[in-house]
Amino acid sequence: MKFYRVKPESEYYQNILKAKNAKVTLREIAIKVQEHFQLPYSPSWSITPDYYYHDLDVLNDEQLKAFKKNGIPKKSNKLGAQIIAFHKELISKEGLEGLRTESDINFSYGVMRRSQNETLESLNGLDTRYIKTNSNCVSSKDDFLEEITEAEYVKAYLAAVEAKEGAKNETKV
């Protein structure tokens, strides 16, 4: 196994942070769309600003006509077109046009599982991201990884678990 720490000042890490932080905003936008068009609550939402998604199981027959089978609004339907336009407006107001997802970022930087025999685990620690893999992570972009020892990885893992447990305990009080 090989262990890596992602350099917090790297372009890769900044892009990952931007994508992670956008998830909350994307959920808020989905809720605004639901409320504006009086759509039933959908527990699922799109993690990309490129399109709006709605769970079809909660829609009534009239609302279903505005959506494709994959949960994306139809451009050819009046309600669907309004939903698309409103969603794009909200995305624009938040400055999220062109935002890439974490998986897209990982793919472009070569941080992903390459074959079925390779494992890749990503740990979001308190200060940065850590990677555990049974293959070499070689970047085709800038140097954003530094190899670390297993002990350093385990320490980061324990710190992340302790922080998570501490957050759970604070919410129980």
Image (spheres, grey):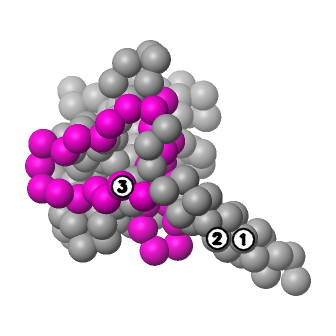
Q: Is residue 85 left or right of residue 20?
A: left
- The alpha-carbon separation of the residues under discs 3 and 1 comes to 23 Å
Q: Which residue is mark 2?
A: 159
Q: Is residue 135 magenta?
A: yes
Q: Amino acid at mark 3?
A: Glu
Q: Position of residue 109 (x, y in %)?
A: 21, 44
- The alpha-carbon separation of the residues under discs 3 and 2 comes to 19 Å
Which of discs 3 and 1 lies nearer the camera? The answer is: 3
Q: Are marks 2 and 1 in contact (CB under 8 Å)?
A: yes
Q: Amino acid at mark 1?
A: Glu
Name the secondary structure under disc 3: strand
Q: Which residues are magenta?
A: 119-148
Q: Which residue is mark 1?
A: 162
Which comes sooner in the sequence, label 3 or label 1?
3
Residue for point 11% across, 49% down: 141
Q: Are marks 3 and 1 in contact (CB under 8 Å)?
A: no
Can you tell which mark lies on residue 145?
none
Q: Amino acid at mark 2?
A: Ala
Residue for point 38% across, 32% down: 135
Residue 168 appears in which quarter of the rendering?
Answer: bottom right
User: Mark 1 Cα within 10 Å, few/some/many (few <14, many 20+)?
Assistant: few
